[in-house]
Image (tube, rainbow, N blue to C red):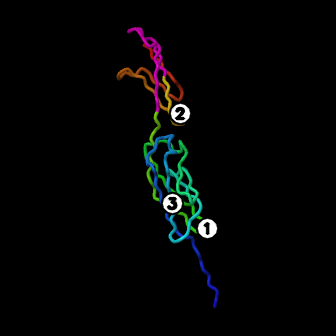
Amino acid sequence: SSAQNLAVTKATTTTTLSLSPSAVTFGDESALVVTATVGPEFAGSPTGTIDVTASGSPLCSIVLPATTCSPANSAVPASGTAYAVSANYLGDANFSASTSSPKELTVSPGNTTTTLTVAPSTVVYGNESTVTFTSTVSSSQPGSPTGTITVAAGSTTLCSFNVASASSCTTSD
């Protein structure tokens, strides 16, 4: 009998993904548990790595046979839109690569605390020549808050400043 060639190809896989919870606060991303599994078309146990991405940016990795990972805090900035999270199995010598269907992840802005002091604290009507407002913004999440603080009396804006470059503003009559 003559020799026959036999071609053995990689078995196909299916990667599944779940997120718990599907919404986190910026700075608390480590509370997110990503679960991903790789199922072979037939028998066997895939080996290797599952890379998890959020809208294309790395989030965390799972080394099989493990099935979960959690991102580092501040791994994903707060956004007005949900991120598309996908699990990408890279394949191994016997099993082909596969990608999960995307799941949505919402990252909300972190909480801040704003304090305001006024100097002088009392002014005489008609003598409001100089009043200084000093404010600090703090957060329990990592990073530094940005944006503008506007000081107003009713609907009248007295002064404003950018928290990244100043901590006070002065109004004069």
Of residues 123 and 14, which is closer to you in this image?
14
Q: CA distance from mark 2 to mark 3?
A: 37 Å
Q: Which quadrant holds the N terminus?
A: bottom right
Q: Position of residue 24 (x, y in %)?
A: 46, 44
What is the secondary structure assignment of the residue under circle 2? Answer: loop
Q: Position of residue 145 (x, y in %)?
A: 50, 33
- Mark sitting on residue 32: none
What is the secondary structure assignment of the residue under circle 1? Answer: loop
Residue at image point 49% right, 55% down: 35
**Amino acid bearing label 3:** Thr
Label 3 or label 1, whichever comes before in sequence order: 3
Residue at which label 3 appears: 37
What is the secondary structure assignment of the residue under circle 3? Answer: strand
Q: Position of residue 79 (x, y in %)?
A: 46, 43
Of residues 161 and 105, which is closer to you in this image?
105
Q: CA distance from mark 3 to mark 1?
A: 18 Å
Crowd tier of the residue under label 2, counting other residues whose Cα lies within 10 Å: few below 14, some 14–19, many 20 or above: few
- Mark sitting on residue 93: 1
Crowd tier of the residue under label 1, counting other residues whose Cα lies within 10 Å: few below 14, some 14–19, many 20 or above: few
Q: Is residue 141 above or below residue 64?
A: above
**Amino acid bearing label 1:** Ala
Crowd tier of the residue under label 3, counting other residues whose Cα lies within 10 Å: few below 14, some 14–19, many 20 or above: many
Q: Is residue 133 above or below residue 93?
A: above
Part of the protein shown in magenta? 112-134
Q: Is residue 44 above or below residue 143?
A: below
Is the Cβ of the residue at disc 2 closer than 8 Å to that at disc 1? no
Residue at image point 51% right, 71% down: 42
Residue at far front of view:
66
Residue at image point 54% right, 47% down: 71
Residue at which label 2 appears: 144
Is the Cβ of the residue at disc 3 closer than 8 Å to that at disc 1? no
Residue 131, magenta (yes or no): yes
